[in-house]
Image (cartoon, grey):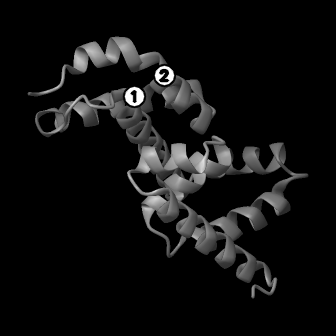
Amino acid sequence: MAIDVEALYRKYGPMVLRRCRQLLQNEDKALDAMQDTFVQLLRHAERLTADAPSSLLYRIATNTCLNILRGEKRRPVSGKEELLMEIASFDEHEERSVTRAFLDELFSREKESTRTIAVLHYVDRLTLEETAVEVGLSVSGVRKRLRALRKRGLALEGVKTS
């Protein structure tokens, strides 16, 4: 039986929008991401079930927002916008650049699901159990991914890991 996307939109739309706002920090982008989340649901409605709709929508919204953020990183901004951004964040520019480069390197060889796990656990503060439910892995699988990510991060920083 196909899921009722309209009913899910009415019931879970506010939750999805809150999630998108939290990740994107921009109202217009969050509204677009919320719509994209439900478009994804519509595209795949025939093969989805409504067993855990809030978890499904939360995961789709997270992935949609992460894709938007990755896409923005690839798209160059105009010279004027770039200059304005540099001026606005002059004090933090070097630190942000270093942090961005570190995270780019850290996640460059990771699965997309590992990024999602990191966001859910470290940003959203979900427990290992809650994170495991959201991504459909065992707790030990989530723990293993986070441990490997931490080890890789420490190695990138030049800290010995034994």
Q: Position of residue 131 (x, y in %)?
A: 52, 47
Asked if 76 appears above or below 157 in the picture, the reply is above
Residue nearest the viewer, comparing 12 with 85: 12
Left/right of residue 14 with respect to residue 98 in the rendered view: left
Q: Report crowding for label 1: few under 14, some 14 to 19, many 20 or more residues within 10 A (C-alpha).
A: some
Inter-mark Cα distance, 1 to 2: 8 Å
Give amino acid for label 2: Met
Q: Which residue is mark 2?
A: 15
Counting from the top left corner in percent of width and height, residue 141 is at: 47, 64
Image location (x, y in percent) of residue 97: 75, 63
Q: Is residue 75 visible?
A: no
- Decide: is 118 above or below 17: below
Q: Are marks 1 and 2 in contact (CB under 8 Å)?
A: yes
**Which residue is drawn at the image coordinates 18% and 25% (left, top)?**
3
State which quarter of the image contains the C terminus. Answer: bottom right
Q: Which residue is painted at 43% across and 33% down in the image?
A: 33
> Residue 105: which quarter of the image?
bottom right
Number of the label disc, if any, that sits on residue 148:
none
In the rendered view, would you say 32 is above or below 152?
above
Comparing 47 with 131, the one in front is 131
Residue bearing mark 1: 54
